[in-house]
Amino acid sequence: MATSAEYRLGPNAYPRGWFIVAEASELDKGAIPVSFFGQDFALYRGESGRVVMLDAYCTHMGTHIAASSSAMIVQEHNNLEGDSIRCPYHGWRFTAEGEVDDIPHIQGECPKVKGLKSYPVREVMGCVMVWWDPEGGEPLFEPPYLPEWDKSNWVQWELDHLGQLPLHGQEIIDNMADASHLGPTHGAPCEWFENEWRDHIYIQRQGGFHVLYDCMLTTTTWYTGPGLLLSKQQFGDVLTYELIANTPVAEGVSQVWHGCLSPAAGDSVTEADKATAKEIQAGALTAFSADFEIWKHKKAATRVMQMNSDGPFMKGRKWFGQFYCEKEKIAEIQQALNGTAQTSYLPLPDAKARELDAGLFD
Ligand code: FES
Ligand SMILES: [Fe+2]
């Protein structure tokens, strides 16, 4: 496990961006404790439907406000009031903004006391995403969204929760520039390959004849910020979107989720469509598991012994650095990188392969 400093990414230990912190359905039974970015948080859905993430530890006496299941106030479901949450120890109430607005039994008005930090949260495609910024700023871009998610003829994913990987997010991102692993790791060497950087977005286009599936495969894969990968994939007649999300838990430890969004055969989703979508997701997970297993057991590559046949790893790493640097340096990094890169031994995608991108980055 290596630290962000060992990868020379910038002054911050954790990157700025949108990250998955839970699948939305995990909040159905009340508040839950989560730990990311070397810190602990309370995550819950308020009565209005709003999802709230607050720092975990009550400013009164340090109780984790979402880690009790046995306190009576939690058992009786009285800890969530409107969009506020009460601490299970003495019942202080914190608003969705993290302010203390009620202290039980206090004589007179509730005094102004230190509250908890509240974080920007979005619920997107069945995922709870939080904007993490070490400098505490507002979001600089929006999380990704696929309009197909809300169409009645697409089967929504239920995420695979893959747990923690003892690997820095840098090495997960390295995969984007890595054409040469597609043969040895996935049995699917590509015939064309291209990378592109557009500000906070990092794109990979690749494809060719897929021997295992016996059909043409075309994919466009992109990161929106440092922790959210989506991939549009056309296997012969089959179209699917894959999600791979990684969120830093500690430096050099990432939590990983995976899912596939696939179309139904007709106008609405049937049980048969759900079964097919599950199979597609399981197949994609098998392919991803080959990366996952390598990552699980590898040593940190804080430096790459770059060969001329390797893809643009170093550009990919510079791109990743924009999420670790001071805010005023972001534009300079983006301007220096924006554009495309070819991997030496592979041609670029032709016009037909590029059709898969239509509308994705508008
Ligand atoms: S420790 Fe939270 S209310 Fe006392
Ligand atoms: Fe891979």
Image: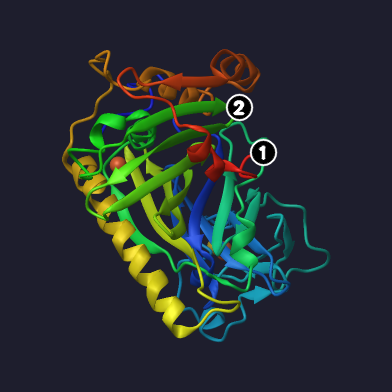
Q: Is residue 5 above or below residue 122?
A: above
* x and y, in percent, of residue 15 in the image: 49, 33
Image label count: 2
Question: Is the shortest distance between ligand 2 and the CB of mark 1 under 8 Å?
Answer: no
* x and y, in percent, of residue 307 in the image: 24, 14
Residue occupying the far bottom of the picture: 76
Quadrant hosting residue 192: top left
**Mark earlier in primary sequence (1, 2):** 1
Direction from residue 17 to residue 314 in the image, left or right: left
- For the question of whether residue 347 can be seen, the reply is yes
Q: Mark 2 — residue?
A: 199
The residue located at (63%, 39%) in the rendering is 361
Q: Nearer the viewer, residue 348 or 308?
A: 348
Amino acid type at mark 2: Asp
Colouring of the image = rainbow
Rendered-image quarter of ligand 1: bottom right
Q: Mark 1 — residue?
A: 141
Q: In the rendering, which numbered label is found on residue 267?
A: none
Amino acid type at mark 1: Phe
Q: Is residue 150 above or below residue 356?
A: below
* x and y, in percent, of residue 318 in the image: 46, 19
- For the question of whether residue 63 can be seen, the reply is no
Q: Is residue 53 above or below residue 313?
A: below
State yes or no: discs 1 and 2 in contact (Cβ < 8 Å): yes
Mark 1 or 2, which is nearer the eye? 2
Quadrant hosting residue 258: bottom left
Which structural element holds mark 2?
A: loop
Direction from residue 71 to residue 151 in the image, left or right: right
Which structural element holds mark 1?
A: loop
Label 1 to label 2, Cα distance in Å? 10 Å
Q: Nearer the viewer, residue 90 or 70?
A: 70
> Which image quadrant: the N terminus?
top left
